[in-house]
Image (spheres, rainbow, N blue to C red):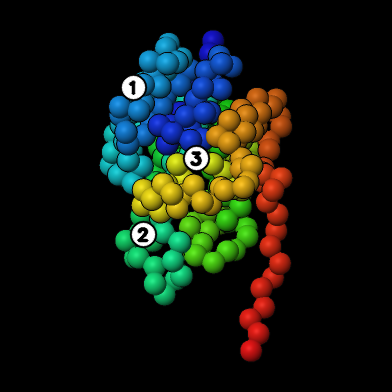
């Protein structure tokens, strides 16, 4: 009998690539995103592997409860992939609307979805929650302020889930990608395609398929194996030197 994975943010990037790879590995899928037309295209591509398309903004607490709780107890793998960065301004110039958007999506939305599906996994005595973090949760960079803080929350929430779930048979993993070439930068720069392209110029960034393969690998481990954290960078990226402001 095929296992069921529910993927948020499945309409593009990591989520879309993961849906494809899980389908290739025999999983049944519930795909979730705001853009229903993109989900339907993916369903048409993957055929019977997709059980349901759910048009949902994870920031909508009541919508999450109404549309996802019916899957509680049925889902074997939850991939909390929905998330974004908005803006790259210094904190004193940053938009509070951007900050709210990141907090509401990356933190609150992730917790809403997790809460909607977790009790069913505990009751079954098995399941796996894979959260999409970021190296921004560990390494600071100018303009990363609230985005980095939101991903630090994801890392801490994941590890605290591990503590809560100890002895239940439910696994938790935090995936922490570095520079990745997806729609991420296009969203961050409010649709400025050229600005987004400039970020990747002269580099070989991670691709959605790279992260999808890592997610599938974590989910494919024997049930007695839990990958707590997986930090992934492209070879061209490394840790920056500590900056010093001189007079």
Q: Tag 3 or tag 2, which sits nearer the N-term?
A: 2
Residue 226 vertical placement versus 108 (above, below): above
Disc 1 designates what residue? 40
Q: Callout 1: few (<14), some (14-19), or many (20+) C-alpha neighbours within 10 Å?
A: some
Number of the label disc, if any, that sits on residue 98 = 2
Q: Residues within 10 Å of mark 3 (few under 14, many from 20)?
A: some
- Disc 3 vs disc 1: which is toward the camera? 3
Q: Residue at x 70, y 58 (%)?
A: 239
Q: Determine the residue positioned at 66% across, 73% down.
A: 243
- Give me the disc on residue 58: none
Task: Looking at the picture, tell me which residue is in the foreground, 65 or 99.
Answer: 99
Residue 110 appears in which quarter of the rendering?
top left
* Residue 38, quarter of the rendered image: top left
Name above or below for residue 16 compared with residue 239.
above
In front of the other: label 2 or label 3? 3
Image point 70% across, 54% down: which residue?
A: 238
**Residue at (36% x, 26% y) in the render:** 39
> Residue 194: in sight, yes or no?
yes
Residue for badge 3: 182
Q: If the image is split into quadrants, where does the C terminus sit? A: bottom right
Please tell me how crowded label 2 is: few (under 14), some (14-19), or many (20+) other residues with Cα within 10 Å. some
Cα–Cα gap, marks 1 and 2: 29 Å
| Quadrant location, the N terminus | top right
Expressed as whole percent of the image width and height from the top left, the position of residue 6 reads 46, 28
Percent x, y of residue 33: 36, 34
Q: Earlier in the sequence, mark 3 or mark 1?
A: 1
Considering depth in this image, is 204 or 147 the residue closer to the camera? 204
Q: Secondary structure at mark 3?
A: loop
Question: Compared with residue 82, is residue 4 higher up or lower down, i.e. above or below?
Answer: above
Residue 78 shown left or right of residue 172 in the figure: left
What is the secondary structure assignment of the residue under circle 1? helix
């Amino acid at each position: 009998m095929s296992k069921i994975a529910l993927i948020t943010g499945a309409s593009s990037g990591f989520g879309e690539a993961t849906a494809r790879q899980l389908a290739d590995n025999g999983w049944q899928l519930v795909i979730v995103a705001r853009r229903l037309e993109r989900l339907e295209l993916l369903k048409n591509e993957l055929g019977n592997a997709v059980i349901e398309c759910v048009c949902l903004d994870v920031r909508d607490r009541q919508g999450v409860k109404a549309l996802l709780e019916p899957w509680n107890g049925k889902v074997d793998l939850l991939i909390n992939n929905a998330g974004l960065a908005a803006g790259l301004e210094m904190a004193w110039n940053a938009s509070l609307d951007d900050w709210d958007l990141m907090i509401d999506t990356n933190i609150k939305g992730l917790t809403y979805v997790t809460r909607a599906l977790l009790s069913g996994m505990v009751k079954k005595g098995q399941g796996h929650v894979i959260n999409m973090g970021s190296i921004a949760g560990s390494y600071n960079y100018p303009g990363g302020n609230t985005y980095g803080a939101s991903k630090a929350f994801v890392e801490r929430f994941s590890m605290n889930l591990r503590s809560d779930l100890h002895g239940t048979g439910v696994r938790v993993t935090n995936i922490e990608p570095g520079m990745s070439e997806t729609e991420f930068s296009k969203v961050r720069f409010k649709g400025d395609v050229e600005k987004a392209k400039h970020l990747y110029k002269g580099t070989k960034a991670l691709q959605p398929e790279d992260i999808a393969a890592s997610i599938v690998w974590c989910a494919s481990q024997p049930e007695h194996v839990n990958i707590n954290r997986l930090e992934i960078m492209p070879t061209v990226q490394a840790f920056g030197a500590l900056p010093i402001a001189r007079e």
